[in-house]
Image (cartoon, grey):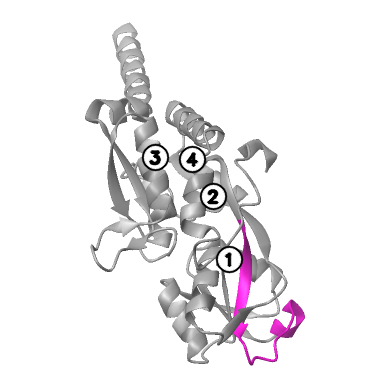
Amino acid sequence: MFRLTFTRVIAVALCVCATTAQADRLSDIKARSKLVCATLTGAEPLAFQNPATREYVGFDVDTCKSLAKHLHVELEHRPISVEARIPELALGRVDVVAASLGYTKERAEQIAFSDIYYQLPLKIIVASNSPIKTFADLAGKKIAANKGSTSELNARNKLAGSEVVTYQDGTMAFLALAQGKVQAYAISQAPGARLLHESSGKFRFLDESLVYEPTGLGVKKGESELLDAVNKALRDMESSGELDALWRKWFGPDTKLKIVREKKLTPLSAF
């Protein structure tokens, strides 16, 4: 009996040690001298392929580069889809996700969020000649949204009288609007502003916003040291003006979006 109990104690201790080792991802990153940071692939200006070089560029890509620099390691950029963001983190296949990851309480039960490094409203796009003027006019209408996005979630919650139709990516969702398969498209302001710019006046935003979305970086739950290091890097980037510079580069007055960064880095505890 004593021998069996002692064996079980040792087994539990070994499991605890293994769990502790697995939960020190920051040490793993330092040991391999590489940060695996995932972004979306076709979400200009957050992350998209430069047509000339085929290299991934954008605000989130630059954020990943800066984060790796602050951690004193190299960057391995990993393209990711909207629906794969949380599973890839949970499975430990990526270290950090910087992919338009809007904070929600439901998501925070599955992954850890960094402090909020930017906030943008979620908007509704309609055709410029559409009779739809307000959210009330969307009753009984079809609204496109990216599958698994906070745009989908908030459209379902706030526009209960409408039918939300999901698509695998923004290109397909916008095409559905252009072809008249849906009457509106729920999307974050930044990629939405790019679509409006490129449509030469064929589409417009409704004045109302679904919500002002707080966006953070995603880290696997239980990785407190990595999360602390990510937050410190973000604070340093904010205090040095680096985040503002990245914002001006991809969203600012010299870009086609011309979006002001109204809200600075905000502690997650504020939400």
Q: Position of residue 172 (x, y in %)?
A: 42, 79
Give the residue pinned by disc 4.
242
For this view, does 255 lie left or right of residue 89?
A: right
User: Which amino acid does the dot numbered 3 rest on?
Assistant: Ser
Q: Secondary structure at mark 1?
A: helix
Q: Position of residue 146 (x, y in %)?
A: 48, 70
Q: Position of residue 22 (x, y in %)?
A: 33, 28
Magenta span: 120-138
Give the residue pinned by disc 3.
66
Q: What's the distance in space between the residues labelled 1 and 2, CA to CA?
A: 21 Å
Tag 2 or tag 1, which sits nearer the N-term?
A: 2
> Disc 1 vs disc 2: which is toward the camera?
1
Q: Secondary structure at mark 3?
A: helix
Q: What's the distance in space between the residues labelled 1 and 4, CA to CA?
A: 22 Å
Give the residue pinned by disc 2.
107
Give the residue pinned by disc 1.
189
